[in-house]
Amino acid sequence: MTGPYTPADPTTMTPPIDRILADTVAGKRLSAADALVLLQSPYLASIGRAANAVTARLHPEPYRTYNIDRNINYTNVCTAVCDFCAFYRPPKHAEGYVLDRDVLMGKIAEMVSVGGDQILLQGGLHPTLELEWYEELLRDIKARFPQVNVHGFSPPEIHHFTKISKRPLREVLERLARAGLGSLPGGGGEILVDRVRKEITRGKVLTDDWLNVHREWHALGGRSTATMMFGHVETLAERVEHLERIRELQDETGGLTAFICWSFQPENTDLATIPPAGPFDYLRTQAVARLFLDNVPNIQSSWVTQGREIGQLALLFGANDMGSLMLEENVVSAAGTVHHLTLAEMRSAISELGWIPRRRNVFYELFEDEADGPLPATLPAAAAPCGPTGCGSTGALLQPSLVPAAAKS
Ligand code: SF4
């Protein structure tokens, strides 16, 4: 599964690629210009080997990880318009919903009954729900399920809450944390270049404000993840610019725990004429992200959008975590792309490559009672990840000081 990195055969490798990869594996920070060269390169195997070597250096442990949670989309009503989103409904649409509180609690109870300890709570940008509604929702959840970590509200939602409440970002985050918000997902990043964002979204947070939500959360002691949805209207240089913004933020705060990328799923969206990026592009992009984001500790596979086999291969292209076995998903399924994995399939995807599968919590702490043994066999098959903003379920952590003790395993 791992091994010492040796540069590729120089007789078959374009010299600049070989130099870039060897330097990066040796620990030299990858420049934006060189990252672009890699993204344009056809040498997928060599880029993957280099990313795998970096992953082996960062994660020499004999296991690879996954977690279990449930995706709950509390509303699909959204004031924004994102051309890539098949999930949202505009205000007053007949198919718009806000989940009944009892239904929502029932979903959490189901998740708890099969051993889950976290929900990914996300929704559209609802035009009338006030900040107090979200605070009350969090308090209700924590009152009934104090052991459950609420991993909720992507940066577009948080930014929206500041507009609805007319309160400063810091205050909104502090109030949500006090009400029980445990960690923050990194959804709605898409491509962090305003030219791209303005072309595919309207009424949604732009780059600087998306980053500021993370920055403020980190300043409060929180942890979060970063995401990237690529393969739509962006250029390769803009993918690199996205990675640069993430790396700069991490240099500044150190608060990001993981990065996840996935290719845009065009089916049933307004961008359906765009051909989907294939596995080659996915694996190469993730591998380059591993090489570029030298300050982000974890990379998650996106098996939900790529399927089990490519999702498994992602573990050899820079990922060290399989992401979440989600018990419910509405967003990727709305776009027509749904891959299912059972718990056994998730674990075997890891073990077939020679690693021990280990379940982790949102803090990347292993479940001590699991060891190599199986989790409850009654877990239902999982369906894809992602929140309304295409966010993925990927981790987001809070400093222990901000997390009620009961939320930690
Ligand atoms: S991606 Fe999120 S913000 Fe955009 S339309 Fe869908 S629900 Fe709304």
Image (cartoon, helix red, strand yellow):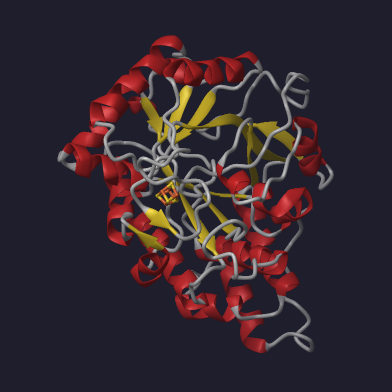
126 or 366, which lies in front? 126
Q: Is residue 14 above or below residue 313?
A: below
97 or 344, which lies in front? 97
Measured as percent of width and height from the top left, residue 313 is found at 75, 55
Would residue 230 be found to the left or right of residue 348 on screen?
A: left
Measured as percent of width and height from the top left, residue 229 is found at 52, 59
One can see residue 379 in this view: yes
- Residue shown at 39%/27% (left/top)? 400
Q: Is residue 284 above or below residue 257?
A: below
Would residue 62 be found to the left or right of residue 81 on screen?
A: right
One can see residue 49 in this view: no
Measured as percent of width and height from the top left, residue 142 is found at 40, 16
- Residue shown at 71%/77% (left/top)? 43
In the displayed orientation, state which residue is furthest to the front: 94
Q: Is residue 163 above or below residue 49?
A: above
Q: Quadrant of residue 324?
A: top right
Measured as percent of width and height from the top left, residue 35 is found at 53, 75
Would residue 190 be found to the left or right of residue 266 on screen?
A: left
- Residue shown at 57%/60% (left/top)? 264
Total labels drawn? 0
Would residue 149 be found to the left or right of residue 109 on screen?
A: left
Q: Quadrant of residue 351?
A: top right
